[in-house]
Amino acid sequence: MNHWLKTCWTVARWEFQRYFKLKDQVIGIISLLVGAVVGYGAIRIAQSAKKVEVAVLGTSAQFELPENGKLKIAEGTLTEQEWQSKVLDRSIDGLLVITQSETSPWEANLTVRQEPAWLEELRPVVQKERIQWQMQAAKLSPETLAQVLAPVDIELVTLASRGVSKVDRLIAYSILGAMLITTWIGLAYMMTGITGEKQHRVTEQIVSAIRPQLWIDGKLIGITGAAIGSLAFLFIPSILCLPLVGWLGWDVSLPDSLNRWEFLPVLLVFYLGGVLFWNCFYAGVASVINDPNTSSRTSLLFLPMLPMIAAGLVVSQPDGAMMRVLSLLPGASSTAMPMRMVLGEVSAVEIMLSLFLMFVGIAGLRLLAGRIFAAGIMLYGKEPSWLDIAKWALSRQGKAQSFSAVMLVLMIANWTMLLPSQGIAQESLDLEQQRKSFDQVWQTIKDVHWDQELVGEKWDAVREELRPKIEQAKDKESVREILRQMLNSLGQSHCGIIPMETYEAMEQQGNQGGEGASGLTLRWIDDQLVVTQVRPDSPANKSGVEVGWALQSINRNEDVRTADQLILAVKKATEGQIVRFETAMGLAATSALTGVIGESLKVAFLDNTNSSKTVVLQLVKGEGIPAKMGNLPLMDIEFQSRLLDDNIGYVAFNAFFDPGRLMKAFQKAVTQEHAQSQGLVIDMRGNIGGMILMTMGMSGWFVDEQGKLGCMKMKDTPLNVVINPRLPRYKRPVAILIDECSISSAEIYAGGLQDIGAARVFGGRSAGLVLPSNVSRLPNQDGFQYVTADYESASGRVLEGQGVLPDESIMLTRAQFKADADPVLSAAKAWILAQPN
Amino acid sequence: MKVRFNRYSYAVALCSLGIGALPSSQNSAIAQETSTATVKSSSAAKSLLNADDVIKKFVSASGGQEKLQAVKSIISKGKLSIPAAGVNGDMVLQQVSDGKFMMSMEIPGVVSQLSGSDGSTLWETSSVTGTEVLSGVRAEQTKHQMTLFPSLEMNRFFDSVECTSQEKFGGEDCYVIEAKKKGQPSMISYFSVATGLGKGNRMTVSTAMGDLKIVSEIKTHIEQDGIQFPGEVESTLPNGMKQVIMMEEIEVNAKIDSKEFALPDDVKSMVKNQ
């Protein structure tokens, strides 16, 4: 069994077992059987109920009542009033008075308490009596009258090879029913499975381990199997009920349609193919739905019902033109063709053609579903546009197009949000300045954006809608909200407004010596905010904080914020955004433990035995050095280079900024400090990105020839992110570590070197916020970040929205930290040491 | 006397950051300032001047053929900035008449970049992106732009040079000179009808990252030794950002040590390995 089959089988079996629970199925059958027995009992009781008694006056004729009917003629010789009294006191159910004479029309009056349900049973009886009366009035002889009243005896001569019985029709509709039920079950399983998986971090691990197409193949097989299994269990009670049906006197002998050896195998193939076909469809649609409860695309999932229902509607003419078309149409053929085989006449050629088209349809839909799934499964937040979906479907690599995300600005905002309360000063608003700012934002996007369709009429409409709101803005924050609303309509990352106060706060922080640091890094693990790194000699290290501890609360000058409050705030901030919650959470939680140098934080944790521990962390100057770049706020940039055990080099930095310092430090690390190392680990975890230019320069020592990390697709101009070989070449293995907080240039760097085989990537999926951007200042002094290009990695992957998937995905748990303080680094080291010298 | 900047890759790199940068269509913008040489005749409409006449007018407006021909070397110093990105830097360009040049560009804390030629090998090295030896179209374009007076060399670097029309550019009526060469993107230069001076150009600049369409406009001129040089040149990059080069000091026929144009060691090893 080759790898594909083995993996596909593993996935299929897992999916099958996930949905097909034998115990549940048995309980389902028992419930159905109980229901059937109860239903049958109810029918019997209904059949044995008291008969409807009707008195008849005005005719001496004897009514011919149906043998198994409800009606019974009341006996007695009472007057009309007396019968009416009996109707009133419910002794009888009705009084039928017939008026017949040669001079007036034949009439029948029925007196009842309420309109009866048995009226339709009485009507033909009375009708027959009237006909007889009229025939007699016409003086027909008794023989003629008998002939007239006798039913016409039509002798049926069928030329077809076999006849169509009621049982055939029952079978045809059963096929339709079986198909509807199975596809409905498949829909439920596929929807809950895929939309649920989009929100699970384990999805990253799976995608790292197996190709999406392989995953979807296994899923299709497993879910198709589970759906068919569920139907089979529904079918078992029907088989069990057959003796009961026979006992009721119904004919249960096999009709001619089933008495053909080829029928059942062909039926089975159509059935399997039909379920598979529609499950492919469901997989594709479910991949582009975030929340089935709110998505307008959910209605698409009912599409498969249409051809099936159409087949049911036109089946009265099984060989009619419509049915012939449906029996060849993939999707409809799985229902229509078997129905035709039961009720009509189908040639072998038609069956073969239908099967061929169905298999072609399945193959095509499987491929499309795989491509859409590959891109869609890793996306959560804003649903992709139809254009995006079309691009994925047409792409060979299941590319994702750009999506909305929280931008770099969010991180900056997080930092400032968590700085000691700075407060945003209320000031009078210079409206003209705000108008100019609005116009600059709108016009810049209009001029620069690479997707002219996106900034065409729709963008004009956004201006029409939002520009007047500037006039009503009460303060700068209202203006920012309007600008953000405008930018959000693009649905892309790296678009945002940086408040002027952020610049001031960062400047102030820089003037005070930089950021106060606790030495802790936190990440969202096991639904908790878990310490993943404790810097040596940091306040946290000296206070005994260990990796694996879970944050409970932070007391900053008696202002206590619990972890739950922080989590709620981030959840709210990321709602409806493509940015992953864990990305924002990791950044926000780490930032929450920074502040002003000298400040004391009282921080409560759950330690690794889940006991409460509270420590006081007096913040010290962090290892970062403040750096300013263009119109971005001042930032503390950290760089570390050290030698690990086993002579493995380690380099880490938190942003691609301060190139004057970082490029030299990186060059020194690669070409001198670690030149003779066994391998090099470049730690991009928590790196928030920055200058793409630096990714080019930092790649040069790992390649022999000029190449590229990727391509920026600007308006009218594609620009390659080139790598120039740099000397001396570093020839040992390079491992790059990433996590959900590796952003932008960090992703471009990791993804690019991964693509060209210059490095192996370890850790968790990166943030997926990679669009190249620029930051300018607006007339109102706020910063304005805007995208300038789309981006594809060297192999053509679109990283925006999807991020970089590690070659070795490592899912962290709190429990792991007890045994290993850094499982990701350990995996990278193990790989390096396993490489030949 | 002439300022010719050829910071293609730097410009491109900054574009990629979004922190924009300058390309060197400025060079061409500046290049058109001088030309005493013969230029292939124009086949433009009769109402237009031919390319020869446009260039002659330009030479005359720039200071005259005699003064321009007397120039053997130039040292130019200036500032560059990308206002929208808040980036500022300094640049120095040294050129001599035999095609040798050395340009340094420094944006404090961001990048320092050198590029040059010893007359045969063209190279670039950046503190951020490393070292490259230029070749192909990119080398050809750079060679042309780094001659002392690119306009005088148009017939050497292009197959045809024609005055094709007259149109508005930078708010002025301009003669449009189109220079073409097989296998290379054409270069369009604008010369003011009123003054005869260069007004700017449009060109597709070949860079390591790809081809960049850049429009440069000469906003002001400054006079040095009786010659008109571009003072402020504004280039519009593909990402919409504008880059400004403001010349502050131009020294004509300055003494330049030939060691200035020697190839750096890493360039030598790259050439050796090629």
Image: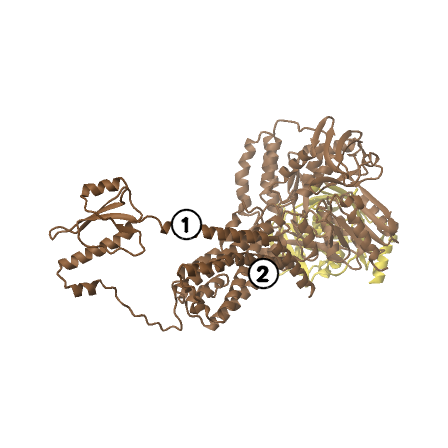
Give the x, y percent position of residue A185.
Answer: 53, 54
Please, which residue is most extreme toward the front here? Answer: A76
Chain of the residue that carries numbered disc 2 in the rendered image: A
Relative vertical location of residue A35 with respect to residue B42 in this rendering, above or below: above
Q: How many residues crowd mark 1 within 10 Å: few (<14), some (14–19), many (20+)?
A: few
- A122 relative position to A495: left or right: left
- A66 relative position to A704: left or right: left
Q: Nearer the viewer, mark 1 or mark 2?
A: 1
Q: Which chain is brown?
A: A
Q: Closest to the observer: B54 or A408?
A: A408
Chain of the residue that carries numbered disc 1 in the rendered image: A
Residue corresponding to mark 2: A366
Amino acid type indicated by mark 2: Arg
Give the x, y percent position of residue B233.
Answer: 70, 45
Number of dots carrying numbers = 2
Amino acid type indicated by mark 1: Ala
Mark sitting on residue A376: none
Give the x, y percent position of residue A645.
Answer: 87, 49
* Pointers 1 and 2 within a single chain: yes
